[in-house]
Amino acid sequence: MITDGRSETTMTIAERQFFILLLLLLQRDARIEQLEYEATHDHLTGAYNRSTFYTLLEHACQQRDRQFALLFCDLNDFKGINDTHGHAAGDLALAQTARRILGATRVGD
């Protein structure tokens, strides 16, 4: 048995190893979830990235029994924002636009 010297909690070596293994598995699962999110979402906007968008669009087109809509947004003079105010301002405009669109749609939209 192992004691920490500060409390009466004791743990066998096997229990300690099991606890450490459990923590490592939980950390691994959280990291996998984070990596999956990063692989499918744009880091700036939080919206699906181009690859995920095309995959979802292809899947939606193959669904014969369901209808879907596609929203296309064109930010007027976006190049002008970047050229005049810098890329940080352009990034902010993209992120805000995405936040507003995502905030106005449902999870399944």
Image: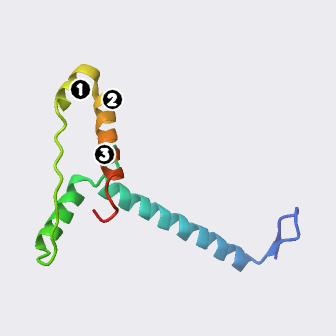
The residue mark sitting in front, 2 or 1, is 1
Q: Quadrant of residue 65?
A: bottom left
Dot 1 and dot 3 residues touching (CB under 8 Å): no
Label 1 vs 3, first from the N-terminus: 1
Q: Quadrant of the C terminus?
A: bottom left
Q: Disc 1 marks which residue?
A: 81
Amino acid type, mark 1: Ile
Q: Is residue 62 depicted above or below 98 in this figure?
A: below
Q: Disc 2 marks which residue?
A: 88
The residue mark sitting in front, 3 or 2, is 3
Amino acid type, mark 3: Ala
Q: Residues within 10 Å of mark 1 (few under 14, many from 20)?
A: some
Question: Is disc 1 placed on a helix, strand or loop?
Answer: helix
Q: Disc 3 marks which residue?
A: 98
The spot of residue 106 in percent (x, y) is 33, 60
Label 3 vs 2, first from the N-terminus: 2
Q: Is residue 12 left or right of residue 49?
A: right
Q: Is residue 15 left or right of residue 99?
A: right
Q: Is residue 49 depicted above or below 74 in this figure?
A: below
The spot of residue 90 in percent (x, y) is 28, 31
